[in-house]
Amino acid sequence: MSGQPLFHPPIPAHAATWEGIDWEALVDAALRCRERAYAPYSGFRVGAALLAADGRIYSGCNVENRVLGLTLCAERGALSAAVADGRTSFRALAIATTATPPCAPCGQCRDALAEFTCDLPVVSVTAGDHEATKWSRFTLQDLLPEPFDLPQPGPRPRSRGSGKETPRRQR
Ligand SMILES: [Zn+2]
């Protein structure tokens, strides 16, 4: 616990860098979490793995509900797990489904992720029997070029990572 407020995380203006990320490990975490997906209604099992700035990986799977609108996506499940553990700065996201071609996050998840980073490198894979068979890559900025933005009252909190204040978004 940092002891600092969680209400407004430091948001890098452009975080989508493909360098220095262990994509194999991140995809593997998404594939493994996909096996725990609860998808009895659609049968469309999804796993996601979110890499926090400190190197920790947070996984999520989709959790369907008989009230279909209550279904939680894997990406937001991973995000919730990370935030609950005090992580609000992220470097990369991997998604595993059986979709061909590999699919991008849904609109809700794009906005949920954009709350914390203006951009994020995303790899989506098609899960085969034992490993990924196809890969696609996106950036969050490409997927959501004009995210919803809500001006926040008061001064911006200082970044917890570098000690430098970072702008919420650059236009
Ligand atoms: Zn989603």
Image (spheres, helix red, strand yellow):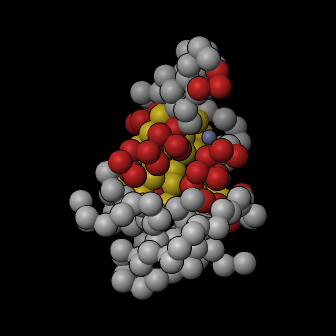
Which residue is at a point 55% across and 15% down the rendered structure image? Answer: 40
- Ligand 1, by image quadrant, is top right
Count all numbered tags in the image, as a single digit.
Answer: 0
Which residue is at a point 51% across and 27% down the rendered structure image? Answer: 63
Q: Is residue 116 something that shows in the picture?
A: yes
**Where in the figure is residue 99, as x and y percent of width and height?**
66, 35
Of residues 111 and 78, the one nearer the viewer is: 111
Which residue is at a point 58% across and 67% down the rendered structure image? Answer: 152
Q: Quadrant of the C terminus?
A: bottom right
Check the image and report above or below for 59 versus 162: above
**Where in the figure is residue 14, as x and y percent of width and height?**
59, 75
Q: Quadrant of the N terminus?
A: bottom left
Check the image and report above or below for 133 versus 117: above
Of residues 126 and 86, the one nearer the viewer is: 86
Q: Is residue 124 something that shows in the picture?
A: no
Using the rendered view, name the quadrant where residue 45 is placed.
top right
**Where in the figure is residue 157, as x and y percent of width and height?**
44, 75
**Where in the figure is residue 79, as x and y percent of width and height?**
46, 48
The furthest residue to the right: 146
The furthest residue to the front: 154
Which residue is at a point 51% across and 77% down the rendered structure image? Answer: 155
